[in-house]
Image (cartoon, rainbow, N blue to C red):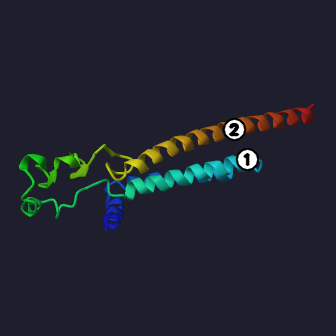
Amino acid sequence: MDQIVSLIYLYNNKDCFSVCVITTSLCVYLLEFFVFFQNNYLSVKILETMFFLVFMLSYLLTALLNPGIPNRDYYSKNFINNNPDLPSSSLVKCSKCNIVVPKSFRISHCNICQVCVKNHDHHCPWTGKCIGEKNLMPFYIFLCFLLCYMFMSFITFLTFLFNWQEMEFKKVKRIKRKLL
C-alpha cells in the first residue's frame, strides 16, 4: 500500500521533476549510445549501460520508497491510550502532524512535504521527497552511480570530440591535396 501511495505522490507532484529527470537522463544515454559510440567501443557501451541501469533503478527506488513516514492512524492520540505503560517523558509529539511517537524514532518534521519522517536526513529536490530511514541506502547508491555515470559520459564525450577533430583534420588534409 505504501508503494501505491508513493507512486501517486510521484505523479501528483506539482513540478513532476522526477519525470523530467528520468526523461533527460534517458535522452542523454540514447544520444551517447547511438551517436558518440563507434563499433570498437563495445566494452565502454556495456559499462556505461550498466552504470545507467543501476543509476535509474536506484533513483526510482529512492523516489518510490516510503522514506519512513509513521502511520498517522497508529501514531495518533490513540497510541497513548493503547500503551498506558509508556512514560510520557519517552514520547514526542509533533505540533504540526499531531502524531505521538517514542523518542527512539528520532523523527523530524519536513516543512516541504508536511510530514514527519524517521531519521530525516533532508528533503531532496531531485526526487521531490524526503530522504529518511527507509530510502537512505538507495539514495547513496543513486549518488555513487550518478557520479560514475557522469564521469563515464564526460570521458565518452571527450573521446568523441577528439576523434571528431582528428577526422575533420584528415578531411581538410585530403581537400588540400585535391586542390593542389
Q: Is residue 99 visible?
A: yes
Q: State how many labels appear.
A: 2
SS for tag 1? loop
Q: Which of 90 and 176 is in front in this view?
A: 90
Residue 19 visible at all: no
The residue at the point 38 percent across, 59 percent down is 64
Rendered residue at 31%/43% (across/down):
121
For the residues bearing labels 2 and 1, Cβ distance under 8 angstroms: yes
Q: Is residue 77 left or right of residue 124?
A: left
Q: Relative to residue 162, is residue 135 drawn left or right?
A: left
Q: Residue 41 carries which label?
A: 1
**What residue does disc 2 label?**
159
Amino acid identity at mark 2: Thr
Of 48 and 68, which appears nearest the observer?
A: 68
Quadrant occupied by the C terminus: top right
131 left or right of 144? Answer: left
Nearest to the eye among marks 2 and 1: give it.
Answer: 1
- The percent position of residue 44, horizontal first and vertical second, equals 68, 46
Q: Residues within 10 Å of mark 1 (few under 14, many from 20)?
A: few
Q: Tell me what residue is drawn at x 34 percent, y 67 percent.
A: 4
Q: Where is residue 140 in the image (x, y as percent from the top left)?
A: 43, 45
Q: Where on the picture, by quarter, is residue 30?
A: bottom right
Q: Earlier in the sequence, mark 2 or mark 1?
A: 1
Amino acid under disc 1: Tyr
Compared across the picture, whether 40 is left or right of 158 comes to right
Which mark, residue 66?
A: none
Quarter containing the N terminus? bottom left
Disc 2 and disc 1: Cα gap in Å? 11 Å
- What is the residue that sits farthest to the front in this orientation? 85
Q: Residue at x 25, y 55 (%)?
A: 69
Give neighbour class at mark 2: few <14, some 14-19, many 20+ (Cα, 10 Å).
some
- Provide residue 163's location: percent of width, then percent of height: 74, 38
